[in-house]
Amino acid sequence: MKALPNSCCAVCDMSDARGLTTTRLSTGELVIVCGNHELMYKRSSKTVASRSELRAMLRDRRRSYDRRSLQIDELGAQLSEAFSDERRAASDRRR
Ligand SMILES: [Zn+2]
């Protein structure tokens, strides 16, 4: 669906018409969003009833997603480190 001219993403205010599309709120209202935020909204299991809710959800989501993935990376690194130590210890014991 083509976005209207002179419009911008309801979440990030991106106004490049080539990257804009629309999404539907739980109220049935069409809201203009960029492709990224349309995808993020589609992927989230939540629905929102207003532009401001959409904005709050997708902005918070991006922040918490960044934080979470960073923590997972750190945890993953610690785990694989601990795991390889354990494996090394185990194979040392077997020798
Ligand atoms: Zn956007």
Image: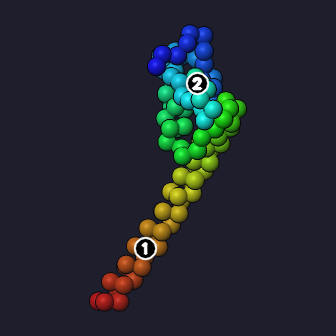
* Residue neighbourhood size for the residue with mark 2, other residues' Cα within 10 Å, grouped as few (<14), some (14–19), many (≥20): some
Residue in view at x 60 percent, y 15 percent: 7
Residue in view at x 53 percent, y 52 percent: 69
**Circle 2 — which element?**
strand
Q: Nearer the viewer, residue 89 or 66?
A: 66
Percent x, y of residue 45: 54, 46
Q: Type of residue at label 1?
A: Phe
Tell me if label 2 and label 1 are in contact, CB under 8 Å.
Answer: no
Q: Nearer the viewer, residue 13 or 87?
A: 13
Q: Type of residue at label 2?
A: Leu
Residue 90 appears in the rendering: yes
Residue in view at x 62 percent, y 48 percent: 64
Ligand 1 has an atom within 8 Å of the beta carbon of the residue at disc 2: no
Tell which residue pokes out farthest to the right in this image: 52
Tell which residue pokes out farthest to the bottom in this image: 94
**Circle 1 — which element?**
helix
Q: Which quadrant of the structure image shows residue 5? A: top right
Q: Nearer the viewer, residue 58 or 65?
A: 58
- Check residue 64 in the rendering and tell me which mark sits there, or answer none: none
Residue 59 appears in the rendering: no
Q: Which quadrant of the structure image shows residue 33? A: top right
The answer to whether 26 is drawn above or below residue 80 in the figure is: above
Percent x, y of residue 81: 45, 69
Percent x, y of residue 84: 40, 73
* Residue neighbourhood size for the residue with mark 1, other residues' Cα within 10 Å, grouped as few (<14), some (14–19), many (≥20): few
- Check residue 83 in the rendering and tell me which mark sits there, or answer none: 1
Alpha carbon separation for disc pair 2 and 1: 50 Å
- Check residue 30 in the rendering and tell me which mark sits there, or answer none: 2
Tell which residue pokes out farthest to the front in this image: 28
